Amino acid sequence: MRISVRGLVKRFGGVPVVDGVSFEVESGKLVALLGPSGGGKSTILRIISGLEKADGGLVLFDGQPVDHLPARVREVGFVFQHYALFRHMTVAQNVGFGLKVRGVKSAQREGRVRELLGLVGLSELADRRPDQLSGGQRQRVALARALAPQPQLLLLDEPFAAVDARVREDLRQWLRRLHDQVQVTSLFVTHDQTEAFAIADQVVVIHRGRLEQAGTPLELLDRPATEFVARFIGEVNVLLADVRDGRAVAGPLSISLDRALPGPRVRVVVRSYDLKFWREDPGMATVARVAALGDRVRVDAVLDGGMPIFAQFPRRSSLLHGVAPGARIHVEVTSAQAFPDEGEEH
């Protein structure tokens, strides 16, 4: 099923929480709605599902408007953040509940439940109740239940937020593999950029109720449309710089601009891996801290003039030789994006 969202508007108490959002989800794709908490992502998901009514705009399924249709007939599966499982039911009963409500015969229902429990790897736990399961197992039950009626669209609202970091990583990869098997159009909400980039075919960035950019993970990384996208995705330095002869000058750094920008000042966004540091006298910066982060090393430094800057390197990078707190270093920017300085913090 192909999903089209056109000019979506939703207000609460007269305040717009979704403000003219438009995007497309191609059939069979796994798409992330990404952005800070409170930005309107879950409201968009609920409008698509029919659980909320929009104040303006359209939602179309395969080119047909569905705004007039109640949630129960939209053929949408919804997975909530906190599972919403029935505590008094077994795993099998939870998965089959939607089918039972729809009047599916017992034998057909039991066959579908067995199929889904096998698909999500929970066949051995069919007779357990939710309080006998781990958080990751409960989330898989919730997903199986959403898939039971064979929906045309699967919506997931922060599906992994309630589990710890290690389980969350395992569930991400499991969801991607499951999606590749079932091929149902899927849209999930997250504020976690790592999660979105790890499993989504396309990412739709929402901020303060508005669309910032939609594209593949690589498009958002390499060609951010706005300063917000550039800053929100990945670990970055933001340098306030003067424009001189087509270059951005920030203290001792002179950075090539990727495009002409109006005004004498710009904000330059530099990703932590797009910087090179190496030991050099007299250098242009002083190392303040070196921190090992697993297979990466973060180096914090201060440019001459007082501007802080940081970079990350593979742990065994030759560039780290002699780089220690107090050392003088040279700094090179290998790639950057510049945006007009509008005199405000984002």
Image (tube, rainbow, N blue to C red):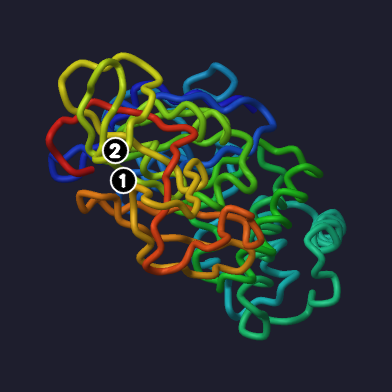
Relative to 100, is 329 on the left or the right?
A: left
Check disc 2 and report its element: helix, strand or loop.
loop
Tell me which amino acid carries mark 2: Gly
Image position of 195 (left or right of 290): right
SS at mark 1? loop
Q: Residue at x 79, y 74 (%)?
A: 126
Whole-number angstrom distance, CA of label 2 to CA of label 1? 5 Å
Q: Quadrant of residue 233?
A: top left
Say whether residue 44 is left or right of residue 96: left
Give the answer, above or below, for where 263 lies relative to 142. above
Q: Quadrant of the C terminus?
A: top left
Give how far across and how far down residue 311 sits, in percent: 46, 52
Q: Which residue is mark 2?
A: 209
Q: Nearer the viewer, residue 91 or 275?
A: 275
Q: Quadrant of residue 16?
A: top left
Q: Which residue is the site of mark 1?
A: 39
Amino acid at pointer 1: Gly
Residue drawn at x 58%, y 60% as measured from the top left? 321
The answer to whether residue 178 is above or below residue 18 is below
Q: Earlier in the sequence, mark 2 or mark 1?
A: 1
Image spot of residue 129 (x, y percent): 68, 81
Label placed on residue 200: none
Asked if the residues shown at circle 2 and circle 1 are in contact, with their CB atoms under 8 angstroms apart, the answer is: yes
Is residue 301 shown left or right of residue 130?
left
Q: Residue at x 34, y 22 (%)?
A: 7
Q: Is residue 5 above or below residue 328?
A: above
Front one among 315 and 187: 315
Find residue 227 and report its horizontal and vertical position in percent.
32, 33
Residue at the (55%, 16%) spot, across then down: 63
Number of numbered callouts drawn: 2
